[in-house]
Every structure is written in C-alpha cells, then in structure tokens.
Image (spheres, rainbow, N blue to C red):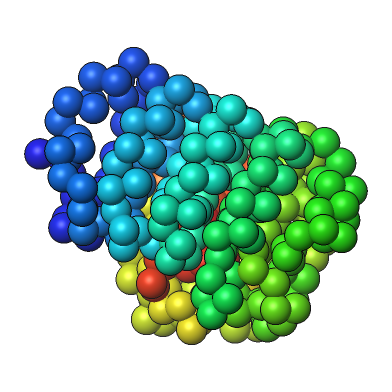
Amino acid sequence: GPPSSSFRLNYSRRRFTDDDLTRLRHELPLKQDNLSYEEVDFSQNEFSSQGLRVVMEVCLRCPKLKVLKLYRNYIDDSGAEGLAELFSSCPNIEEVHLSHNRFTAAGVETLVAAAELARPENMSPLWLRLEQNDVADPDAVYADMQTRLSVCNRPDERYCSVRGCCKKMQVHLPFFSWQRGTRQQPENNKPTAGPAAHVPNNAKVVGPSFRVPRAEANGVPAGLRLPPPPPKANGSGTTTHGTPAWDAMGIGRHKNSGYNSGTDMHAANKNGTAAATGYP
C-alpha cells in the first residue's frame, strides 16, 4: 500500500515521471470519494503538469486537505488551472508548496486569483510557496498583482505567518522575489539574529526536515543552512566542529543528494511544520 498514515499520503523523492504516475494511478485510492488525508506530498519528483492530473485526482477526494507539497517538479502554467480547481474544492487548505517548478507570471496570477476567490473570509491566509520558478522580474509582477489581488509577500516576519497577515490579505507569497536565476537571496529574506534564526528546542526531526509548532513558525525558511556553532573545546583542549542537529536538508551528511546549499530553500511543514516553514 501507499507509504503513508491515515492522515498523510507520502510519495516524495521517488523520481516519479508522468508515465510513472499513470501506472501508479492503479494503486492509488481513487475509488473512494472521501479520503482522510490532510497532507499529500509528491514533492521532489520528476513529473510535469501532465502527471499533476493524477495527483489532483487524489487531492480532490480529500475534503480535509490542509497541506499539499509539490515542490521540485516540472509543473508549469498548464497545471495552474487544475490547482485553481483545488482551491475551490478544498477551501480549508492552508499550505501549497510549489517552489522549484516552472511557473511564469501568468501561472502565478492564475493561482493567486483563484486562491483569493475561494478563500473563506474567516480563514487564515493561504501560505503559497512559489519561489524559484520562472517568473521574470518578480518584484514588478508582485507590485502589479498587489494593485488587484489580496496578496502579501510577508514583509514582516514577526507579524505575518501561517496564522495571519498584518495586512489582512488572503494569500501569502513568502520569498517570492527569489526566482530562478536570482544570484543571491533577497535582503529581506536573510536569516535574522536572535531566536528567529534558530530552530525551537521542541522541534521534532522528521526525515529530511523538522516540524515546529505553528505558533513558533517564523523567520528562517527551513533548509537554509546557518553558520555552524562556535567550536567547543574537548577534553584534550582541541576544538571540534559538530554538524548542527537541525541541518534540516542533510546537506552536510549527503553531499551527493542533489541539494545545493546555495539554492535549496524549501522544507516541509504542517500543523507543526515550520511554515516559513516548510521547505516549504
């Protein structure tokens, strides 16, 4: 059966192509109309908008869906309409992680407009990760959307989170300025000093990521590596450098994993997953 719990369907990091997903369709629980999954994870695979259709068949059967992870695939603007349908079918969805795909400005606007239209008034803003896509001049694109849509790029990490927006907008686009081809991380997204730059003590290590209670999910995107702690003297008087326990993406331990510490900026998340979180 699927490698999942009753609340999480996990097919991440399988190198699934469009053809693989077509074959996988026969073992997915598509005969049921009311699935219990609150999180669906098909991140870090190799499928395009064509394969996305199979994923959407599952998601549209999950009325309690809160988190959808599709980062690091090859989904482009042709997949935006299917995702837009999901926003109206699952109005309680909280996080959608689409970074490191192939969306352009047109696809981004389709997604933001659909999310705003479907978002209930009393709901927290949708946490929509779309950094590292193919959006040319993202600052200009965001400025234009802001004149017509209820969208916020989370300028204040202290007051904008998965729980609320300081501007009372309905869609959050954190880290949106950091698109493919950007040479360095935007200034306002750099790790800050103090508690926000550290993973809370009660964070739980979960595979290649960690989970953080939502109330504490702010600040640094999981997956960004901070400098190692100062060297500590051991019994012999020499010093040692230990790899930080919260090296979420395992970059130091998996040099051949395909991650690039200069560009990977996405992590998992949900009800506890770091939402600035999440590799998203």
Residue 94 coordinates in the image, percent (x, y): 47, 65
Q: Determine which quarter of the picture holds residue 106.
A: top right
Q: Is residue 5 left or right of residue 196?
A: left
Q: How many marks?
A: 0
Rendered residue at 23%/19% (across/down): 23
Q: Nearer the viewer, residue 255 or 143?
A: 143
Q: Position of residue 36 (x, y in %)?
A: 21, 58
The picture places residue 27, in percent across and down from the top left corner, at 15, 30
On-image quarter of the N terminus:
top left
Relative vertical location of residue 239 with respect to residue 217 in this rendering, above or below:
above
Q: Nearer the viewer, residue 141 or 121?
A: 121
Q: Position of residue 276 (x, y in %)?
A: 57, 66
Q: Is residue 9 visible?
A: yes
Residue 13 in view here: no
Residue at screen point 59% across, 70% down: 125
Q: Is 233 located above or below residue 10 in the figure?
A: below
> Which residue is depicted at the point 55% across and 60% down?
118
146 left or right of 130? right
